[in-house]
Image (spheres, rainbow, N blue to C red):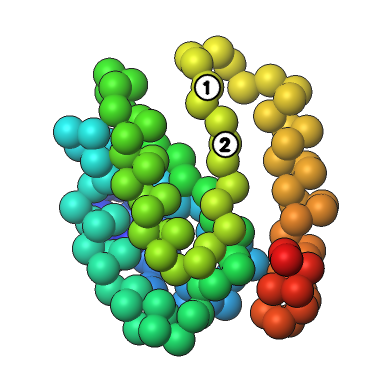
Amino acid sequence: MVKKNEHAKLKEIPVATPNELSSYDGIAFGSPIYFGNMSTAMSEFLSMTVDLWTKHGLEGMPATVFMSAGSGAGKELAIQSIWNSLAVHGMILVSNGIRGNEKIDVKFHKVTRYWVQQVFPLQKMSKDQAKVSAI
């Protein structure tokens, strides 16, 4: 979470800080959708990552985005709004595809397994090695 929440079920979830993001192997950003855009809390959080940007702290790190909307409208636009911020950081954007309202199936689990087993272990390379292998 990017902001403390007093809701009983969310109260104990730790709040992320921009300074700790560079220590992660990868990041999945999630946000509710408001008028086709990310939440204000997420926007404010991403705005606090300027120091990471100047130090290239997130460059080459895999990232994905998931969103939630009551009507389902505006998801693609809202996801793109976060992708723009992640692209500025030089993060590797991992698309989750455009999905309908079907239930999550075996294909989803195969893709998840692929990323966990094949892609995230690559983050153990140095950033210079990752740059060379990306070229």
Q: Please indicate whether residue 8 sits to the left or right of residue 66 in the image.
A: left
Where residue 24 sits in the image (x, y, percent)?
Answer: 58, 70
Q: In terms of image quadrants, where is residue 62?
A: bottom right
**Residue matched to label 2:** 96
Could you tell me which quadrant the N terminus lies in? bottom left
Residue 130 % position (x, y): 73, 72
Q: Does 41 appear above or below 133?
A: above
* Res 99 label: 1
Question: What is the three-letter code of the residue carrying label 1?
Answer: Arg
In the image, residue 58 sits, relative to residue 102, either above or below, namely: below
Residue drawn where x is 24% and y is 41% of the image: 37
- Percent from the top left, x then y, of residue 32? 30, 39
Mark identifier at residue 29: none
Residue 121 drawn above or below residue 117 = below
Q: Is mark 2 on a helix, strand or loop?
A: loop
From where the camera sits, is residue 19 visible?
no
* Quadrant position of residue 131: bottom right
How far apart are the alpha carbons under marks 2 and 1? Answer: 8 Å
Structural crowding at the residue carrying mark 1, measured as other residues with C-alpha within 10 Å and reported as few (<14), some (14–19) or many (≥20)? few
